[in-house]
Image: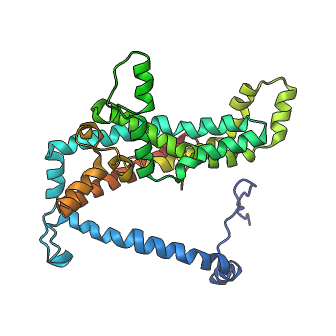
């Protein structure tokens, strides 16, 4: 009698189904790692997932005296109000523009810095330069804002001193709507670009030096080696970090903007986070601002899922 056979190849191994005994054995083997993960799991449960229950406020006329159970339900009324409010559309535009500028200009800067640092051969100079680039990351936004405002001061700032010495008029940068987006994006790049190079430098150290030696023997220049070896080697890291950045596309940062914001530049500088602070906490519009925050979170989720799907289709790399 003929017997059916299942073809087996090296590229399609038969998956081994684990029994409960295997799982228990695996848990006992790695019990130290499981125990170490407990504080992290508790942190996310308590501070990330439990607060999600408060999102029901977006569908209620929430009263702090009646609570979640006693406050009346209003459905999507707060979302309708959000899109009908002219100032919200202006604030949404500011948030999207700042996020786009920050992603388009700020994201490549750590990659370029890491590639340049990787080319430095004098270790003392390289370590010193790295330390100088990392330092702004450890400063708070209050300090960063104070430094920037002092540098751009119309009377004592170094920028205006240079402009007036060249014959130009002094400019009150913090009082002009047209400059606030440039100030916000450039201050963020100065603060975090050096810190962002750490992961890329770690990825660069993992490249096999034999590849560079073989390229040198073939007569490839440093620029050619960078294009053919270095950039392809760190491309998976770049893809993963880009996807993570997309997930925070609309999360520009509350403190980052608040320290620079004033009544003269709020037309182009106010974003969703600062609006939530002023309308939600100061004006006590809890349900309305919760609806805005929920909208921002949903947009971030859609962006990261879409970006991950597109990345897996184009490069084969993805977060999950």
* Image position of 131 with respect to 31: above or below: above
Rendered location of residue 138, percent (x, y): 53, 53
13 sits to left or right of 156: right
Query: Residue at 39% of width from left, 36% of height from top?
Result: 183
Counting the numbered discs, the total is 0
Which is more toward the observer, 146 or 187?
146
Which is more toward the observer, 278 or 174?
174
Rendered location of residue 217, percent (x, y): 88, 27
Q: Residue furthest top?
A: 167
Query: Residue at 74% of width from left, 46% of height from top?
Result: 205
- Residue 56 seen in render: yes
Q: Quadrant of the C terminus?
A: bottom right
Q: How is the image coloured?
A: rainbow
* Image position of 69 with respect to 253: above or below: below
Which is more toward the observer, 71 or 144?
144
Rendered location of residue 227, percent (x, y): 68, 29
Query: Residue at 19% of width from left, 63% of height from top?
Result: 287
Rendered location of residue 67, percent (x, y): 18, 76
- Residue 100 seen in render: no
Which is more toward the observer, 214 or 184?
184
């Amino acid at each position: 009698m003929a017997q059916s056979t299942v073809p087996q190849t090296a590229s399609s191994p038969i998956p081994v189904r684990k029994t409960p005994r295997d799982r228990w054995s695996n848990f006992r083997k790695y019990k130290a790692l499981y125990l170490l993960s407990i504080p992290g799991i508790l942190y996310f449960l308590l501070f990330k997932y439990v607060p999600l229950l408060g999102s029901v406020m977006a569908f209620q006329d929430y009263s702090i005296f009646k609570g979640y159970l006693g406050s009346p339900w209003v459905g999507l009324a707060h979302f309708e109000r959000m899109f009908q409010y002219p100032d919200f559309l202006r604030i949404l535009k500011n948030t999207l523009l700042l996020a786009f500028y920050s992603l388009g200009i700020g994201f490549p800067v750590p990659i370029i810095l890491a590639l340049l640092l990787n080319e430095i051969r004098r270790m003392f100079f390289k370590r010193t330069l790295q330390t100088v680039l990392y330092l702004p990351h450890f400063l708070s936004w209050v300090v960063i804002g104070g430094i920037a405002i002092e540098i751009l001061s119309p009377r004592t700032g170094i920028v205006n001193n240079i402009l007036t010495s060249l014959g130009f008029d002094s400019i009150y940068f913090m009082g002009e709507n047209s400059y606030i987006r440039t100030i916000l994006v450039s201050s963020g790049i100065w603060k975090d670009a050096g810190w962002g190079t750490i992961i890329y430098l770690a990825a660069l150290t993992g490249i096999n030096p034999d590849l560079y030696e073989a390229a040198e023997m073939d007569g490839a220049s440093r620029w050619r080696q960078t294009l053919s070896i270095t950039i392809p080697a760190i491309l998976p890291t770049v893809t993963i970090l880009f996807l993570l950045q997309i997930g925070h596309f609309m999360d520009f940062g509350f403190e980052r903007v608040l320290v620079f914001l004033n009544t003269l530049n709020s037309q182009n500088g106010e974003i969703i986070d600062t609006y939530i602070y002023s309308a939600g906490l100061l004006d006590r519009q809890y349900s309305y601002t919760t609806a805005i925050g929920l909208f921002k979170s949903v947009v971030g989720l859609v962006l990261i899922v879409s970006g991950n799907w597109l990345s897996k289709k184009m490069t084969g790399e993805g977060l999950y």
